[in-house]
Amino acid sequence: MIAANSESAAIDHFVSPPEGGTVAVSGPDDRVKLSYAQEETASPASSAFDMIVKLGNNKVDVYRYRDPDTGRSGYFDGKGYRLGQYLLRNPVPDARRTSGFGTRRHPVLGYSRMHAGVDWAAPIGTPIYAAADGVVKSVGKHGGDGKMTVIDHGHGYESAYSHQSRFADGIKAGVTVHQGEVIGYVGKSGLVTGPHLHYAMSVNGRKVDPMQVHFIREGRLSGTALAKFEKAVAADGDKAHTEAGV
Ligand SMILES: [Zn+2]
């Protein structure tokens, strides 16, 4: 009941190739491992298969699941949240992560404060990719953030890209962008010591660590659909996991 090309279908669902490229960019140490049960005969009760996605040090269990009520398949995490597109954690290829999310001593201001994003150091002019599909919410100068672009990905998810040297042509509020599309270029505008991208992510207005947020959650199963899903996941958990590198 699982299509022969389900691995590539799964990757297509989550990741689009960057502009002009054929290989999807994710984090520097990401691994996707699929493990699933082949079923010779379709059974309406059992329809989950487990896709273990290892992203850096984090392991995310992803289930492709056919909702018995609607007959439609989708991707879900273990708690029954529908998973949409994967968010690029490194929107600048080959950049070096110089500062993570959390409280730190500010390199310019000199006192400790929350660093609500991740810094990716790269030469001025290095292209910056949109982390996922979305609509540009704002483009402009923003105090210490310098030249900043904010993208609304829907479902409460927003990504912000600060300290740019310049914005890509055609990037303005209201424009639709796709994952991997060049939206601007690394710079050192704003309150910085050197060229880097300050990459920030917020969910429902709350700043979160971009290294810890992997997928856009598009809502959750509820009621009997959730109960059936949990049952299918529990049944799946009894199976031995075999890992296939992708
Ligand atoms: Zn920063």
Image (cartoon, rainbow, N blue to C red):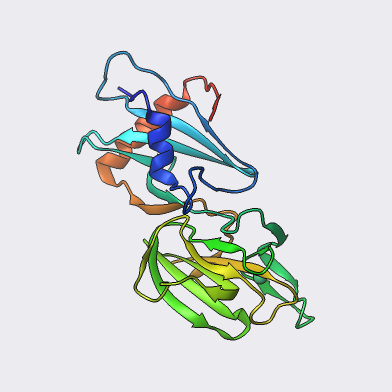
- In the image, farthest residue toward the top: 40
- Residue 164: image quadrant is bottom right
Residue 133 in the image: state x and y as whole percent.
40, 58
Q: Nearer the viewer, residue 63 or 84?
A: 84
- In the image, farthest residue toward the right: 110
Residue drawn at x 40%, y 53% is 217
Residue drawn at x 39%, y 18% is 38
- Residue 91: image quadrant is bottom right
Displayed-image quarter of ligand 1: bottom right
Q: Which quadrant does the N terminus fall into? A: top left
- In the image, farthest residue toward the bottom: 143
Q: Is residue 91 above or below residue 57?
A: below
Q: Give left or right: position of 218 versus 87.
A: left
Q: Give left or right: position of 120 versus 8.
A: right
- For the image, the number of numbered tags is 0
Residue 45 in the image: state x and y as whole percent.
28, 25
Q: Give left or right: position of 218 versus 182.
A: left
Q: Is residue 183 above or below residue 29?
A: below
- Residue 171: image quadrant is bottom left
Residue drawn at x 43%, y 48% is 16
- In the image, farthest residue toward the left: 70
Q: Give left or right: position of 101 versus 155.
A: right
Residue 108 in the image: state x and y as whole percent.
76, 81
Residue drawn at x 70%, y 71% is 195
Q: Nearer the viewer, residue 88 or 77?
A: 88
